[in-house]
Amino acid sequence: MLEIIDNADLSAHTSLRLQGRVDRLIRVHHPTELADAKRALRGAFRGLLGEGTNSVFGSHIQGSMIQIAWRGIERISPNQVRAQAGENWDELVQWSLCQELQGLENLSMIPGSVGAAPIQNIGAYGVELSQRFSELEAVHWEHHERKRFRLADCFFSYRSSIFKQLSHQGWIISQVDFQLNPQDAGDPSSVLHYAYPDLMQRFACAAPRNARELAQAVRSIRSHKLPDPNIEPNAGSFFHNPRLSNPIVMDLKARFPELPIYPDGAHHHKIPAAWMIERCGLKGQRQGDVGVSDKHALVLVNYGQASGESLLAFAQTIIQAVQQRFGLTLSIEPRVLLR
Ligand SMILES: Cc1cc2nc3c(=O)[nH]c(=O)nc-3n(C[C@H](O)[C@H](O)[C@H](O)COP(=O)(O)OP(=O)(O)OC[C@H]3O[C@@H](n4cnc5c(N)ncnc54)[C@H](O)[C@@H]3O)c2cc1C
């Protein structure tokens, strides 16, 4: 059954808790209900909502949004798992660990839904979704075609995929399949990834014995480093880390010798946006109800009754400060919809 909520309060459906409303929010509990949802629109279709942990909305969104709410996880072969789009990502991670499957442990505690995870190819602690992805099924909003997308079709890259391109924004991801490793398949340390600096430090004396131990370490590091969105509403990283070609990076490094740089392929490096924001003196700074977290400079927090508009105005002051000091223009990671 469709759930229709008129004049829906978006602060209740987003991790930033920004003040805002949409004319109609339609919660869909099965992909076959999408046709009914289309008939139930009030005004224009304005986009999809999973758990709203990577979204910034303005004070009034005109038209209707569709929230994907169908759930379910199953093991479709000894090393393949299928999860429905409305399933909570971290519950999938925990479920796979209970099934003695390894592969998703580094992606523990990332908020949001399974269906949104391929959109920006979620990643953390040295692993990206694309490395564990098998294929997905999507339904087209306009012509109702049902299609399977394999790895090569998705064009995954750093926090991006083909689904971010305008040409593919009509696809609604209905389920995602993952390729994982049964824990009894051999030496666990050979497939566990703990080369990321924080994890290396944690496991300096002994390698993690299994995926659960690695997942526990990731959870503990995340809890220490990142503000809890239930206490300080946020959307995780607000800006992408710039990926720059080697000559540009070397030029920057000559001007800022302490700049941390991370190789990314043969010809590029990634630069931590958090480091630049901190160097601009903005970590912990506030402007009205919004501010930069004092725990992590890449995280913007709604400290009260902020709107999407005020958060974005604050984000612009950060972008300008970084531009003036480093000559780089930061880009915003979450999806932004203002009207
Ligand atoms: C505290 C915190 C920490 C975070 N840490 C990380 C991290 O470590 N790594 C990382 O990569 N991200 C991180 N994020 C960002 C966020 O968790 C991910 O982007 C997540 O995948 C968003 O899921 P969602 O369901 O909330 O998406 P939403 O915000 O609801 O939607 C995001 C986008 O996905 C689209 N979408 C949603 N569902 C579907 C669907 N079924 N089919 C097609 N499109 C769809 C929407 O249209 C929108 O464009 C973090 C966020 C928070 C709040």
Image (cartoon, rainbow, N blue to C red):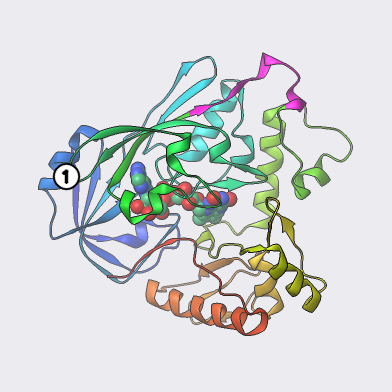
**Residue that sits furthest to the right in the current view:** 205
Q: Viewed as shown, does residue 85 lie left or right of 190?
A: left
* Residue 320 x/y as whole percent: 55, 82
Q: Viewed as shown, does residue 167 lie left or right of 103?
A: left
Q: Viewed as shown, does residue 135 lie left or right of 266?
A: left
- Depth check: give the residue in front, 145 or 283: 145
Residue where numbered disc 1 is placed = 37
* Residue 125 x/y as whole percent: 67, 46
Q: Quadrant of residue 114?
A: top left
Decide whether residue 300 is among the magenta residues: no
**Whether residue 316 is visible:** yes
* Residue 190 x/y as whole percent: 75, 26
Residue plotted at (59% across, 27% down): 97
Magenta-colored span:
178-190
Above or below, 123 relative to 42: above
- Depth check: give the residue in front, 70 or 246: 246
* Residue 262 x/y as whole percent: 73, 57
**Whether residue 51 is visible:** no
Decide whether residue 181 is among the magenta residues: yes
Q: Viewed as shown, does residue 184 lie left or right of 121?
A: right
Q: Quadrant of residue 127?
A: top right
Task: Give the amino acid at mark 1.
Answer: Ala
